[in-house]
Image (tube, helix red, strand yellow):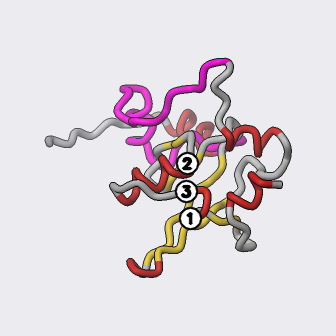
Amino acid sequence: MMLRKIDVDDEVYAHLEQAATPLVDTPNSVLRRLLGLDHDTSIPKPGQISPLANLVASGRLLAGQRLTWHRRNHKRTHLAVVTKDGRLRLENGTTHKSPSGACGAISGIAINGWSAWHTEDGTPLQALRDT
């Protein structure tokens, strides 16, 4: 893969970084979204609201809230941020409509994201969904 440099207007980039739910981590993540190179960035159609969006709508999760996934065997902790539309934005800038989809994108295998992801106080998403 050949990498090319694209200059991003400072004013536009600053605006994107300061949005209520930041749209970018890097200029490259913006371009990946615009070109459709992220695999799970589609906006849910009416009637297809994700369970995470329901948690945001009910106030059990907040837009901008950080979640962690501690992988003891890999000695690694992954971070995600809840977006205002009820998705998880990973450290690489990709967004995922389900916690399990986010885990799969990181690990490459199927993992129950409802039990894997926790709020910063240690509450698993499963507990928030079941309340």
**What SS does tag 3 mark?**
helix
Of residues 12 and 110, which is closer to you in this image?
A: 110
Pointer 2 residue: 89
N-terminal of the pair, mark 2 or mark 1, is: 2
Residue under the point 55% across and 67% down = 69
CA–CA distance in space, label 1 to label 3? 5 Å
* Number of the front mark, 3 or 2: 3
* Circle 2 residues within 10 Å: few <14, some 14–19, many ≥20: many
Residue under the point 35% across and 56% down = 109
Q: Is residue 80 magenta?
A: no
Across and down, in percent, residue 65 comes to 71, 56
**Which span of residues is magenta-colored?**
18-46
Of residues 103 and 90, which is closer to you in this image?
A: 103
Pointer 3 residue: 113
Considering every residue shown, the one lying at the far top of the view is 46
Name the residue type under label 1.
Ala
Pointer 1 residue: 116
Q: Are marks 1 and 3 in contact (CB under 8 Å)?
A: yes
Quarter that holds the C terminus: bottom right
CA–CA distance in space, label 2 to label 1? 15 Å
